[in-house]
Image (spheres, helix red, strand yellow):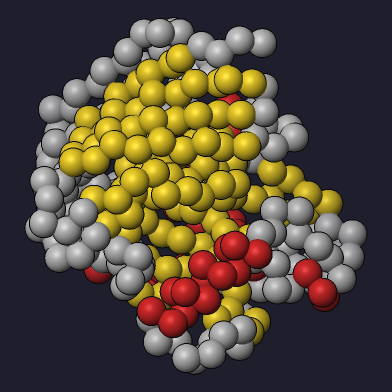
Amino acid sequence: MSRFCCCFSGGGSAEKMSKVSSEASNGSTKTAPTTAGQENRSKSSAKGPSPVLVEHFTSQGCSSCPSSDLLLSKLGQESVRGSTSGEDEATTTAGTPPLIVLAYHVDYWDYLGWKDPFANHRWSSRQRAYGEALQQDSIYTPEVVVQGRSHCIGSNEDNVSALIKDAPQFPALDLRVSFKRPSPSDLEMSLSLSCKLKVEGNLDVMVAVFENGQVTDCGKGENRGRVLTNDFIVRSLDKACTLQNGQTKKAQGQVSIKLWDGYSKTKCGMAVFLQNPLTMEVYGAQLVHLPDDI
């Protein structure tokens, strides 16, 4: 049973560069390692759509979430392996379209006895915004939101798969990203983006940094005594810029990210996605692999 919560009403700096460029089709995009000051270009011969964005709202304090965490980790890892191993980028496992998973750990179950080390009140607020946009009576964990348009209980594999397969897909983003590490605790990212979209209204260009492979011994609360494994944990989410309504679908922007204790590039990744700030609908996403030497 899922737990429901009625929480709302109504050294020096070197520059590293990489390029992710996808044009609408059936192949995969691979990004080669970069060295400082060197631009890395990758041009796919494929013309597949951009991945489907799957946002997972979860908590280590909720006993219903571990099974959902494992399911979403499996789906996300399968999609990543498929897109980097040369499989058809338009479809991956069992006909499922490529996807990007982002896991937001909410804080409203911390009072039950276990304080989720990855919880952030911003993610609880983001879930409430989805609840209002999707006209839900309540928000709950575990919850999956697909392309900002539909939601279901995250531990129900059949329903999750159905929402992913039925989700609208959009043209691939043409994205160029550069990185700077001005200090050990700071990461700066600049991007330029173009897309083939005809959408009324503004689209925010959102940048999420996530972390994989976290294992936690849970000593209290509903999951006391369990070893919890979490992937795709959102560590930061920032707006880089906005694609303005009526203008050419090109934009440039920057974000500055404060890194956390224990940050390791090998466990982290980045996702860029377009979102209407009023409807919360998502109009395309792209996975960005961090350079090896960042």
Do we see residue 73 in this rendering?
no
For residue 199, side relative to residue 210 (left or right):
left
User: Which x, y percent locates residue 120?
Assistant: 66, 59
Q: Is residue 284 above or below residue 61?
A: above
Where's the N terminus, which quadrant? bottom right
Q: Nearer the viewer, residue 126 or 284?
A: 126
Q: Nearer the viewer, residue 127 or 24?
A: 127
Q: Is residue 130 above or below residue 177?
A: below
Q: Nearer the viewer, residue 230 or 92?
A: 230
> Hey, which quadrant is residue 261 in on the image?
top right
User: Which x, y percent locates residue 270?
Assistant: 46, 38
Q: Is residue 39 above or below residue 191?
A: above
For residue 139, side relative to residue 97 (left or right):
right
Q: Nearer the viewer, residue 201 or 198?
A: 201
> Hey, which quadrant is residue 245 in on the image?
bottom left
User: Which x, y percent locates residue 158?
Assistant: 41, 72
Do we see residue 206 in this rendering?
yes
User: Which x, y percent locates residue 231?
Assistant: 59, 47
Q: Is residue 193 above or below residue 53?
A: above
